[in-house]
């Protein structure tokens, strides 16, 4: 779906999704929302990203939809942060903390550079 | 799911150690064209005298998981028995048009793209059945790919052992240091699977991490 302003110029729609909204959704709902958004030509910015298991499920769901018309998703996030409380340290547990994630169609979102603290990407219209 | 599969894997590994008869199932993961099948072939050729799969320059050459059971690796006076699981390259996008530049006909390229997508799904599903992962990265490329981040995240969440293999160090532009700096919490072993460089260090690492 192409977005245009009142002058008829093509625009890119960016949906910035809060941590609270994501927390209220199941994994299946998040994945469906992301895939539907990318198919519609949106760029999605997730404040807290997905858990690693959800990222794997998203890739799996993306591959199910691959066709000559839908070539997949471009997804970029920072490496997960490990969060360990005192109790976690006592019991040897590690919790991964999902981080900001940007998702879009590979035809629209091109990553130029990525490192531990910076993601540089170009966004184009559909 | 992560905690259950971690507990199940650890219990199974522990039982195997007690009775000394179980192979450790190790998946070889990474993006397309980083040398996963070249590495699988190298390990299996070194210890079992055969190849597991065909390699080529065209991405997604391996589109089905291939498993070679009971590969016994000797390290010093000890040994470890592995099931080597060579997986199709993980990707978040597959465009059949990319294969056209390698000389494939359109129909063949579309078929390859479909099979490659199925291969990615199969690779991800195998994550639930492994005891550990060799994550292969191309030492000439940027290590911060989403595939690398996703595999590392999943292994950390499942609390399964993982060794990062920095492959292609025989190439002049290789920079294994970039990979070491990118993932300082993990052990990185620089190798050339093609030339066989530093394989002894990798076998030591496999024994230490997965026994």
Image: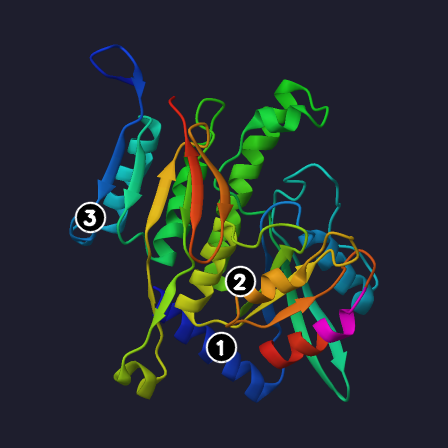
Residue B102, horizontal then vertical, whole percent: 71, 28
Q: Which residues are magenta?
A: B197-202
Is residue A70 shown left or right of residue B177?
Answer: left
Is residue A109 shown left or right of residue B15?
Answer: left
Badge 2: chain ID: B
Co-location on one chain, circles 2 and 1: yes
Q: What residue is pinned by disc 2?
A: B182
Residue B191, horizontal then vertical, whole percent: 73, 64
Magenta span contains residue B198 = yes
Residue at the spot 52% in from the left edge and 43% down from the top edge:
B91
> Crowdedness of circle 3 by 10 Å Cα count: few (<14), some, many (20+)?
few
Residue B77, placed above or below residue B205: below
Q: What residue is pinned by disc 1?
A: B12
Q: Nearer the viewer, residue B19 or B13?
A: B13
Badge 3: chain ID: A
Secondary structure at badge 3 equals loop
Residue at the spot 36% in from the left edge and 43% down from the top edge:
A102
Q: What residue is pinned by disc 3?
A: A18
Residue at the spot 48% in from the left edge and 71% down from the top edge:
B160
Quarter of the image where one finds residue A63: top left
């Amino acid at each position: 779906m192409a977005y245009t302003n009142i002058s008829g110029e093509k625009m890119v729609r960016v949906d910035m999704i809060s941590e609270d909204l994501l927390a209220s959704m199941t994994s299946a709902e998040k994945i469906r929302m992301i895939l539907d958004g990318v198919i519609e030509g949106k760029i999605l910015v997730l404040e807290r990203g997905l858990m690693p298991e959800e990222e794997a499920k998203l890739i799996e769901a993306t591959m199910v939809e691959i066709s000559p018309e839908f070539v997949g998703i471009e997804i970029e996030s920072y490496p997960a942060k490990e969060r360990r409380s005192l109790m976690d340290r006592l019991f040897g547990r590690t919790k991964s903390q999902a981080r900001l994630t940007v998702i879009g169609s590979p035809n629209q979102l091109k990553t130029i550079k990525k490192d531990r603290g910076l993601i540089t990407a170009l966004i184009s219209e559909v | 799911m992560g905690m259950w599969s971690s507990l199940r894997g650890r219990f199974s590994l522990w039982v195997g150690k007690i009775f000394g008869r179980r192979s450790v199932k190790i998946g070889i993961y990474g993006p397309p064209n980083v040398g996963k099948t070249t590495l699988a072939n190298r390990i299996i050729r070194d210890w079992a005298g055969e190849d597991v799969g065909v390699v080529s320059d065209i991405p997604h050459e391996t589109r089905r998981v291939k498993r070679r059971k009971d590969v016994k690796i000797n390290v010093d006076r000890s040994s470890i028995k592995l099931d080597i699981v060579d997986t199709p390259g993980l990707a978040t996008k597959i465009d059949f048009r990319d294969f056209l530049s390698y000389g494939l006909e359109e129909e063949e390229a579309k078929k390859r793209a479909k099979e490659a997508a199925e291969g990615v799904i199969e690779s991800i599903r195998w994550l639930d059945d492994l005891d550990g992962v060799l994550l292969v990265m191309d030492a000439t490329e940027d290590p911060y790919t989403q595939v690398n981040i996703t595999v590392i995240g999943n292994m950390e969440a499942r609390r399964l052992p993982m060794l990062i293999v920095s492959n292609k160090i025989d190439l002049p532009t290789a920079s294994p240091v970039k990979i070491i700096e990118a993932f300082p919490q993990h052990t990185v072993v620089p190798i050339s699977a093609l030339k066989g460089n530093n394989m002894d260090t990798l076998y030591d690492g496999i024994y230490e991490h997965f026994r």
